[in-house]
Image: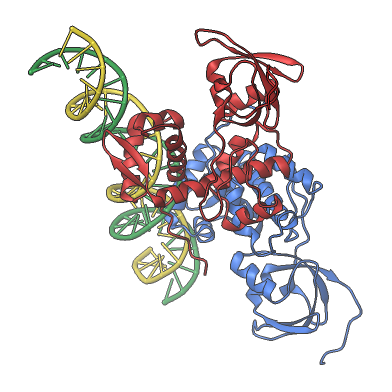
Chain colours: A red, B blue, C green, D yellow
Amino acid sequence: MTKSEDRTITPAIEDYLKTIYVLQQELVAVTTTAIAERLNFAAPSVTNMLKKLADLHLVHYTPYQGVELTPAGEKVALEVIRHHRLLELYLIEALGYSWDQVHDEADRLEHVISEQFEERIDIALGRPTLDPHGDPIPTKDGNLPAADETRLVDLEVGQSAVIVRVAGGADVLRYVASLGLLPQITVHVLDRAPFNGPLTVRVGEERHALGRELAEYIFVAPVMERVKTKGD
Amino acid sequence: MTKSEDRTITPAIEDYLKTIYVLQQELVAVTTTAIAERLNFAAPSVTNMLKKLADLHLVHYTPYQGVELTPAGEKVALEVIRHHRLLELYLIEALGYSWDQVHDEADRLEHVISEQFEERIDIALGRPTLDPHGDPIPTKDGNLPAADETRLVDLEVGQSAVIVRVAGGADVLRYVASLGLLPQITVHVLDRAPFNGPLTVRVGEERHALGRELAEYIFVAPVMERVKTKGD
DNA sequence: CTTCCGATTTAGTCATGGCTAAGTTATATC
DNA sequence: GATATAACTTAGCCATGACTAAATCGGAAG
């Protein structure tokens, strides 16, 4: 009856493709080392896998140069990312997870849920387009609406913005959440210390100093509110 | 403080322990071959794993004799079974799966969900005690209330009973469901053909002939209603 | 042009967990 | 008691996917 599928795509392969997809959006070239760092693997392990992915026609791999997803590879990556983001949203909305607890759970579940499971939670959530971090959820046919990509670190003193999403791992999410910096929240930039020093921001009644690196993880939608001179 | 994970327990180990647990309830001795058949593995693969499980003190293994779970092994088995049964119920209750679709999904999910996930769906379901097949759900501290174990095949002609659960794989479940033989449903035994022949049962307005083997998979709670005469 | 160094790949190892082929054990039967 | 046979184990193989150590590439500096 339902005989097992062509299990060429393993969880490990899915993780690599997902990582490469994300890195492609951050970097000009996706290198072995960048992948190794992101996945916490040794570089040779990555080289190994890249050769395998190339054999499977999931990436274009040029030794010493880097990799790029093929359309087939991108399709797999987007499916995994769709699973991940739907799961994160479902865990929060349906099961009451908190914002910073969902990532690890989704990382494990994303590899094992069926098409049916995906479809059922998609329906249960009302076919959402954004995940809890504000990232767009790829559609079933592999389209990903681009998100705004202004970073908190790029704002000028005096500007305000609404947090859209926060990148980075669970530790970053937890810390950022503890400061009240959650999606939908408005922040005001009070100061930018020189020499790559911290940003001081106001969130509600509180003030926090954020390292530059941290502020690169926080993506915002700028609010062009009345600044100094009477704006239009 | 949640202790850091003892990653000695792999999904493969969980599958073996779960299978051994189930077989212990069905058989006097759990043999290599019985495990191999249930898991669809070759016998030597099982022998191999049994040695590993014995090293981990999860089973008592006597070569050529069979295995038995240790308390530690039983604990793991019950945790996995708890995951499985909670998941099956959740898939049906919360996500609208049908009765015969849940097994495979639960088989994959049971190995990856966290304690938190288990707790959340347990709460969402109102801390249930029976899964959709009528099997009891082990408690978090590893207790499993015994279920009634009368089989449909053991009923006399003229007896009626309510189906409690159906054992067997997805193919059995699917077929049995297609006959309308679902938990909560009442069946009436109309005939038992001699020489191990089929049972004829009435379900609602329909009659079906069931092989003896199939009728062994169907567990019932007998109903002592008025005895009827033969024929009709 | 050479030299150096970090990035990368090659080579070879290990654990997991399947497999087949071939021996060994237990046991039922003559 | 001898032996056939099914059950079981041993031995050895394979793919995955991680690792370290060592060679190699390639770009920036001298």
Tell me which corner region of the image, top left, top right, bottom left or bottom right, holds residue A203: top right
Indicate whether B37 appears above or below A66: below
x 70%, y 77%: residue: B179
Q: Position of residue C23 (x, y in %)?
A: 31, 55
| Quadrant of the drawing holding the N terminus of chain B | top right
Q: Position of residue C17 (x, y in %)?
A: 45, 47
A150 or B59, nearer to the observer = A150
Question: Can residue B7 be seen here?
Answer: yes
Tell me which corner region of the image, top left, top right, bottom left or bottom right, holds residue A85: top right
| Quadrant of the drawing holding the C terminus of chain B | bottom right
A171 or B3, nearer to the observer = A171
x 40%, y 51%: residue: A71
Q: Position of residue A120 (x, y in %)?
A: 66, 56
B1 or B228, nearer to the observer = B1
Kindly give the residue lying farthest to the bottom in the view shown. Answer: B232
x 26%, y 33%: residue: A64
Tell me which corner region of the image, top left, top right, bottom left or bottom right, holds residue A6: bottom left
Indicate whether D22 appears above or below B232: above
Q: Is residue B113 left or right of residue B187?
A: left
